[in-house]
Amino acid sequence: MHYNRSPHPLIAITPVVVLICFLGIAIALFGSDSLSGGSQIALLMGMAVCVCLSMFIYRTPWGVFEKQIKKTLGEVSITLVILLCVGMLAGSWMISGVVPTMIYYGIQIMSPQFFLVSSCIICALVSVLSGSSWTTIATIGVALLGIAHALGISEAWTAGSIISGAYFGDKMSPLSDTTILASSATGVDLFTHIRYMTYTTTPTFAITLVVFFIAGLGRNEGAELQVGDYTEGLARTFNISLWILLVPVLTGGLIARRVPSLIVLFVSSLMAGIVALILQPHILCQIAGTEEPTAAALTSGLARAYYGSTAIETGYAPLNELVSTNGMAGMLNTVWLILCAMCFGAAMVASGMIASITQVIARLARNRVSLVSSTVGTGIFLNITTGDQFISIVLNADMYKEVFRKQGYEPRLLSRTTEDAATVTSVLIPWNTCGMTQSTVLGVPTLTYLPYCFFNLLSPLMSILVAAIGWKIRKRPDAS
């Protein structure tokens, strides 16, 4: 794609180094808010350095970059629409009572002996339904940590259980922006990507649950679990009914029939909207700011749940935060980040710098195990150096896409390996946006909870183990 000879690897790595430096500055200045603009500026600065080096040293014309940027943005256009539909779905599932119903029944299964394993399962369930580990940890996770304190259970163990469950759900949810980003960056269908991840994620999560189950045995019945405020608040605010669960069941049916992702998300949002109109009209009126359930009020409330921020008063502050949503507007920072990341990646591809870097890597990755191990190692390295999981996912996909293709492996192997490394390890790094956010929210230092995040620690290792076994790993039919 590049206009002249291949850039020297030291030249090729320069934009990445510049990007890392600017990301460090953005994180130092803005912390977890760096995703609201600082990281995007860093990506554009990295792109500018890439373009300048290529144009002045290798005489690459601007038209080459422009063509590649248009091509790359075109490839992710559907992904951006999917992200907006994800925001629409998240809002509708909450105000319709789908997520509150799941929380209502799930939170009641806890006991002191099974607290750790129950916490992990509940956080996994909420994260799958919401598509957000951050929201799960900041709401139900904080509540679970408070319960743990009352029961005398270690905050490090509890934080590890909460984070393990939340990141399992984030990784496997079709609503998750990281899951969507990993699949789109590698050119893999969203649900194909999720199904393929089960071969590494399911055994990892099973081992994690066994560890937390064993750790919880022998605990005496302690203080009354403080779940009453949650269940009472949910029952007081929403019309809780098992019939509501038909929405996720029907959505699962659409997924099983391999209906395109965009259609599944849109249809599921419509189903949840209908349920909201039937069972939760008072919620829609509250969102609309009126008490009279007129057609205009219901329509306004539903529309706002789809596209904007909603705040529902439950009478219990932590629950208010849990049931609040941001709709499609909540996805705009992610959309913005993807656009800037794709521009940086397009510039690296057009200049030939990605190819130069991957040639060095390819010489080290000579077989299936070394290829997957290198991908895992690079994903973790990028999380450490860039401080952001979104950027790590995009860069990891860009760096290895051509290597996987040349060695004949399906792109879904790359998408899975990228998630096994880049998505789940971000929370283990103190200066990563994920690590900073979760340690602040839970009040537990990153290095304190790190040894107990078994799912996050085991996922990269399981990815390499499955590659060594060769389970469900096939080369493309057209590969030589």
Image (spheres, rainbow, N blue to C red):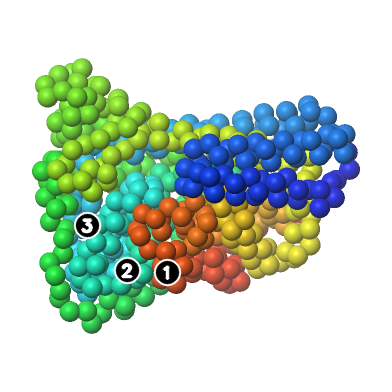
Direction front: furthest residue: 29
Vertical placement of residue 138 versus 85, above or below: below
The amino acid sitting under disc 2 is Glu
Q: Which residue is mark 3?
A: 106
Residue 351: x %, y % from top left: 78, 39
The answer to which of 211 and 273 lies nearer the viewer is 211
Cβ atoms at labels 2 and 1 below 8 Å apart: yes
Q: Could you tell me how many numbered marks the image carries?
A: 3
Residue 410: x %, y % from top left: 62, 53
Decide which of tag 2 and tag 1 comes sooner along the chain.
2
Direction bottom: furthest residue: 218
Q: Quadrant of the N terminus?
A: top right
Tell me the SS state at disc 2. helix
Decide which of tag 1 and tag 3 comes sooner along the chain.
3
Residue occupying the point 42% across, 69% down:
448
Q: Which residue is mark 1?
A: 448
Gap between marks 3 and 2, in whole Å? Answer: 21 Å
Task: Count residues near mark 2 (Cα–Cα under 10 Å), then give few for <14, some for 14-19, many for 20+.
Answer: some
Vertical placement of residue 168 versus 450, above or below: above
Gap between marks 2 and 1, in whole Å? Answer: 9 Å
The answer to which of 326 and 121 lies nearer the viewer is 326
Cβ atoms at labels 3 and 2 below 8 Å apart: no
Residue occupying the point 14% across, 31% down:
282
Gap between marks 1 and 3, in whole Å? Answer: 28 Å
Q: Which residue is mark 2?
A: 155
